[in-house]
Image: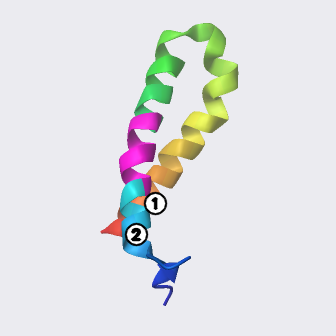
Amino acid sequence: MLDTVAGLPVHVLVIHAVVVLTPLAALAAAAYALVPRWRSALTWPTLSLAVVSALSAVVAA
């Protein structure tokens, strides 16, 4: 299996991805819900952040 990336443990990188991407996904979802004119620009980034954050959480577990 893949244990390191550039000399860093994969588990640590994935944990940090979860810690960073989950709040970003929440902020993007809040902006999507509260600012109607931004919805067209935030649709795919919000979805992408949510999916990557969820997958990172599963991998980290």
Residue at which label 1 appears: 55
Q: Position of residue 22 (x, y in %)?
A: 40, 43
Label 2 sits on a secondary structure element that is: helix
Task: Tell me the number on the disc at residue 43.
Answer: none
The region drawn magenta spans 17-24
Q: Position of residue 39 (x, y in %)?
A: 62, 19
Q: Residue 6 sits in which quadrant?
A: bottom right
| Three-letter amino acid code at the position of disc 1 | Leu
Front residue of this view, candidates 14 and 46: 14
Q: How crowded is mark 2: few (under 14 residues within 10 Å), some or many (20 or more)?
A: few
Q: Which residue is drawn at 49% across and 90% down?
A: 1
Q: Distance between the residues labelled 2 and 1?
A: 6 Å
Q: Residue at x 43, y 65 (%)?
A: 13
Asked if the residues shown at circle 2 and circle 1 are in contact, with their CB atoms under 8 angstroms apart, the answer is yes
| Three-letter amino acid code at the position of disc 2 | Val
Residue at which label 2 appears: 59
47 to 43, vertically: above or below: below
